[in-house]
Image (cartoon, grey):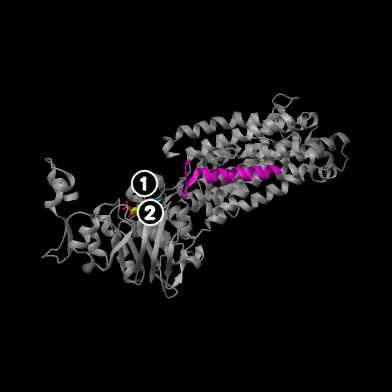
Amino acid sequence: MLQAKNITVSFGGKKALRGVDFTAQPGQITAIVGPNGSGKTTLLRALTGEVEHNGTVSLDSHDIAGMKGWELAARRAVLPQAAALAFPFTVIEVVRMGLFGGTSGGDATVPSAALARVGLSGYADRLYQELSGGEQQRVQLARVLAQVWHPVWQGAARWLLLDEPVASLDIAHQLLVMGIARDFAKVGGGVVAVMHDLNLTAMFADTVAVMAAGQMVAQGPMAQVMTDDTLSHAYGCGLRVSVAPPMTSTFVLPHTAQLTHDIGPLAPFSAVRTNTGC
Amino acid sequence: MAAITDALLDTPKGGREVTARRAHLWLLALLVISCLFSLAYGAAGTSLWGALSKLATGQVLSDMERVVLWDIRAPRTLMGASVGASLAVAGAVMQGLFRNPLADPGLVGVGAGAGLGAISAIVLAAWLPVAFIDLFGNWLVSAAAFFGGWASTLLLYRVATRSGRTSVATMLLAGIALGALAGAVSGILVYMADDTQLRDLTFWGLGSLAGATWPKLFVAGPLILASIAAAGFLGRGLNAMALGEATAHHIGIPVQRLKNVAVMTVAASTGAAVAVAGGIGFVGIVVPHLLRLATGPDHRMLLPNAALLGASLLIGADVIARVVIAPAELPIGIVTAVLGAPVFLWILLRRRGLVDL
Ligand SMILES: Nc1ncnc2c1ncn2[C@@H]1O[C@H](COP(=O)(O)OP(=O)(O)OP(=O)(O)O)[C@@H](O)[C@H]1O
Ligand SMILES: [Mg+2]
């Protein structure tokens, strides 16, 4: 279990998180949603021990502050929101970097298997910097997968902490990546994913945590948390959660009646904007 | 150099690791050849081959041959190798640490900081007891140069790195400011210096291997060897740093320790090199860059290869400095600048814009 208690993070006097509690169970996908700047990335960085914070973060009831870097690296892998690479490494070299801390180390087949898993089999010897944005993001995901290749290791669950894993992916690859996360959780691993796409969240997340203005607004099973009220309140605009009769899956749509209030009178492109704006 | 240029022309990317391993051997051969050249050529007409054939047939060397080969050319060659290797390794480590191919101790003020240390030691030594100077004189200059290099590397990293990201523009500009400041303080010290000290300073400031002696080599050598050996442990960590500090931490790299060791390595090798040879520019930028083009950016291969190529390159530059206007000598810094500055400009031109740097 990955648990954060009463986390407060300040950046030069400005509080990005105020007393946030958060729990994620292995075997589940836990999604963190919320508007821009609400503190999702900051919470994830507190969970990895990367930012200074008050409060405690524990992994299977061990305080991570007392764990060594390599111990943590063996238990969890992190996909950052934005990843940069300094020198012209090839794709396979980048994926192999994931092996340094993890314990898949001995197995030389892991990096190519990880690449195949994200649909980049033929890319091993390409230069990372020459790939498209979405391809680069999938290489980073492959690196993260290589680090914790076996979701359960020495009897303990391992964790994937993903900050917007599908942000620059096309719809097919969004489904591929979320499928990878689901498979990882299905066999006992834990996944925490920061998400912006509420429909994808509804489709894949077991537990949802909603953040707004540095605070945790709600956390619980997806169907209980994703309600008109909670989401509309968190995002500050009208949202309607429905269950589509033929598929019985949950989906979220903007409340069109409020659109004119939020973004002004709609020009001829209103049809397009109603699908994306809110 | 043939191996390098071959590799530059067509390197199958998949085989980069193999190419890099093979490059170890080529570069070792190149180093042996350049050492032989450096022993064979010089202002005095003494012939290495003549001496070798005398030795082979059991004859005794003349005094002239012994002095020229053993007391002058041998320490000079070894000093060239150590200084070249340390400059190239310092460049490669600094570039890995700053995640930028343009970081070079000479360019960003670390060399100037080390120089300030060395100058302070030479000038301020006048206030120290004579017995102390007799014993530790050589060490004092090296230690002061090391300290100056360490302080400026640390300061530069602090200034240029915000929340794990190093801004190149800040790094280069801060480096210029740092270099100017160190230069100004050095100027004040030079103004304070007496005549003997001035001679020492001028000699040192020319950037030359001409002052190489066995005792100097015994001072600088261990520091340089130690820092090159330390760099050998940085390969994996520097590779991970290419993904950024945060990700390196996530992968399990002890980032803070890595940075400390890297800064110390840069300071020790730059400091030692500057203390014995003055300011020699561009080796630290050209050597790692050529190697990255030829065999890829993997620091586990890059660092040892840089040491080998840097050593050969500086020995080669020293041979050129000795023979080009013989019997006079060019300062070696001029040779490395003439060879290195165009390569530096070429690197700049190949990059798309400052944002990309
Ligand atoms: N390094 C930093 N220095 C100062 N303020 C920061 C820093 N990182 C984040 N913040 C602030 O903390 C708040 C939360 O930022 P955070 O990155 O956690 O948001 P987020 O929920 O991930 O947003 P997004 O959806 O845009 O990724 C923001 O107001 C941001 O300006
Ligand atoms: Mg974010």
**Disc 2 Cβ-to-ligand 2 distance below 8 Å:** no
> Which residue is found at the position 43% from the left and 51% from the top?
A12
> In the image as oriented, which residue stretches furthest toward the front?
A13
User: Camera-side residue: B28 or A44?
Assistant: A44
Residue A118 picture quarter: bottom left
Q: Is residue B122 magenta?
A: no
- Left or right: residue A205 versus residue A249 is right
Residue B311 in view in this figure: no
Residue identifier under label 1: A131
Q: Please tell me whether the stretch drawn in magenta is mainly helix, strand or loop.
A: helix
Chain to which mark 1 belongs: A
Residue B187 place in picture, x, y as percent: 67, 30
Residue identifier under label 2: A139
Stretch of the chain drawn in magenta = B144-167
- Neighbor class of circle 2 (other Cα within 10 Å; few <14, some 14-19, many 20+) is many
Above or below residue A217? Residue A80 is above
User: Camera-side residue: B86 or B46?
Assistant: B86
> First in sequence: mark 1 or mark 2?
1
Chain to which mark 2 belongs: A
Above or below residue B42? Residue A125 is below
User: Camera-side residue: A230 or A90?
Assistant: A230
Residue A47 place in picture, x, y as percent: 41, 63
User: Of helix, strand and loop, which one carries label 1?
Assistant: loop
Residue A191 picture quarter: bottom left
Q: Are marks 1 and 2 in contact (CB under 8 Å)?
A: yes
Rendered-image quadrant of the N terminus of chain A = bottom left
Q: Amino acid at mark 1?
A: Leu
Above or below residue A5? Residue A33 is above
- Left or right: residue B289 versus residue A37 is right
Q: Amino acid at mark 2?
A: Val
Q: Is residue B163 magenta?
A: yes
